[in-house]
Image: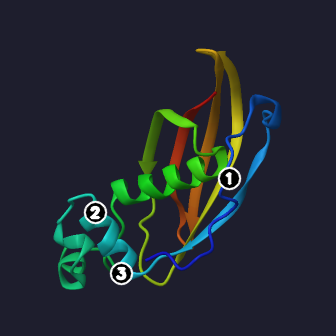
Amino acid sequence: MLTAPRPERRTSTRTAAEVSVGQRLAPWPVPVTQLSIAALATATFDFNDVHLDRDAAHERGARDVYMNILGSSALVNCYLTDWAGPEARVVDFRTRLAAQNHPGDTCTLDGVVTGLQPADGGTHVTVDVRGTNSLGDHVIASATIALP
């Protein structure tokens, strides 16, 4: 479904000593295809026809089918947990969509660490993520990740 190589997928969990405010995550360019849009919509049980049927999307004013918010959120969560490692947990997640993701475009996810806080015997790391495509911002998210 996703043809882009993923950024570093850690096999060990990051420690607080490896993270600093202002640290940038490696960008992840994700090609957007009709198949990836349909697969993410189906995986999240969103059978709204604008994610599956070009004609329905056109009738509602979109130029093509487009990715749903749950699919975009899944990509952001994958990006974050690949960066943080297998024992990290996303404990807070906020997201909003802006420009639509259409087939034939690329959505590039970029992240930056914006906060570190000791918590529960570990560290909470706040990361802000933007996913941009040819239309501008597609997804804007902020997540708190618990590191052991």
The numbered dot on residue 43 is 2
Between circles 3 and 2, the one closer to the viewer is 2
Residue name at image x 43 percent, y 47 percent: 96
Image height of 116 relative to 22, above or below: above
Indicate which disc, 1 or 3, sits on the residue closer to the N terminus: 1
Report helix, strand or loop for mark 1. loop
**Amino acid identity at mark 3:** Leu
From the image, tell me which residue sits under label 3. 35
From the image, tell me which residue sits under label 1. 10
Q: Which x, y percent locates residue 4?
A: 59, 76
Give the number of callouts: 3
Q: Foreground residue, 137 or 82?
A: 82
Image quarter for residue 36? Answer: bottom left
- Seen from this angle, which residue lies furthest front? 11
Q: Which quadrant is the N terminus positioned in?
A: bottom left
**Amino acid identity at mark 2:** Ala
C-alpha gap between disc 1 and disc 3: 27 Å
| Left or right of 7 on screen, residue 30 | left
Q: Please rate how many residues cluster around mark 1, counting C-alpha atoms within 10 Å: few if below 14, some from 14 to 19, many from 20.
A: few
Image quarter for residue 71? Answer: bottom left
The numbered dot on residue 145 is none
Q: Foreground residue, 121 or 5?
A: 121
Tags 3 and 2 in contact by the CB under 8 Å rule?
Answer: no
Q: Which x, y percent locates residue 97?
A: 42, 53
C-alpha gap between disc 1 and disc 2: 25 Å
